[in-house]
Amino acid sequence: MYKQGLSILIPVFNRNCCALVQELHIQAVNCGIDFEIIVVEDGSTNPKYVDQNRPVAAIDHVRYIIHEENMGRAIIRNWLADKAEYDTLLFLDCDVDILDPDYLKRYLDNKASVVCGGLCIGGDANKLRHSLRYHYEKTHEKEYTAKQRKRNPYKNFRTTNFLIEHKVMEGCRFDERFRQYGYEDVIFGKTLKQNGIIISHIENPVYLTRFESNTYFMIKTEEALHTLYKFRKDIVPYSRLLQHVEVLKKIGLLPVLRLIYRSSIGYYLMRNLNGERPVSQLYNLYKLMFFASLKP
């Protein structure tokens, strides 16, 4: 049996999470609950962020752990769940902000086994006008509302911000085959569905206000597409891109797309998206072309 209370679990990779931890600590104290916050550096490669995060270890009820090697997004979440003491788990990405003083209370008032709070996109639009990640997220932000997520509750599961009963995590683990970036949350949503676990989607968002460089975003994109290709048979009902690929395959256009990508067009698309003034409308086209170019 787990102790009654809340374990807040934050895997960290090359980010400063101090403000996030401090805000969560304040809210948990104000809620008057038993709680812990476990922060794990999952193989962070930039010592600047590790040094910036070390002070959180001095905060009451906070455990700060450094892993020298990166475990990956699936394994680290299972590991965190195994280390947690309390019966309710809150998983958060390290690069988000909490702007609502009742954020924790709203979660604690919900009695569902799994609760997803959602995501809002913040930041200065003018300063971020050349950020590819910002434009991508802003374009899709309307899909992140609880109303939209409820239409496909399992397909719309994201690990960014969710609450789960510890006992549910015992039977529904993250698939540890997913060692590289991407789609571990999609498979976890599928696992919850297969086990008959209801997901409650509510409006309790965290805010994304800091965005990686275009170059790093494209590196992550290509890594995720490799993951998607490797596990495409498991993911196909949950991926729009795979559905588009199937249509192109049926009408014989997939080889054409592959040839186009391997021509100079693919190079110029990538150079634009990596650059200082990317045309964000080309991003989805590039993903489709890159995926088409992949082979076993």
Image (cartoon, grey):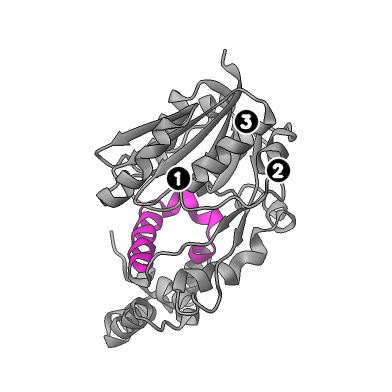
Whichever of callouts 1 and 3 sits on the residue coming sooner in the sequence is: 1
Residue 37 bears which disc, if any?
none
Looking at the rendered structure, the secondary structure element under dot 2 is loop
Q: Please tell me which residue is depicted at 31% across the width and 81% down the height of the picture.
A: 271
Q: Can residue 272 be found in the magenta stretch?
A: no
Q: Amino acid at mark 3?
A: Val
Please name which of the two marks, 3 or 2, marks the residue nearer to the observer: 3
Q: Is residue 177 visible?
A: no
Residue 29 bears which disc, if any?
3
Looking at the rendered structure, the secondary structure element under dot 3 is helix
Residue 206: x and y in percent read 60, 52
Whichever of callouts 1 and 2 sits on the residue coming sooner in the sequence is: 1
Residue, disc 2: 102
Q: Please tell me which residue is depicted at 29% across the width and 63% down the height of the picture.
A: 295
The magenta stretch is: 216-242
Q: Amino acid at mark 1?
A: Cys
Q: Specify whether 274 is left or right of 184.
A: left
Total numbered labels: 3
Residue 230: x and y in percent read 35, 53
Residue, disc 1: 18
Quadrant occupied by the C terminus: bottom left
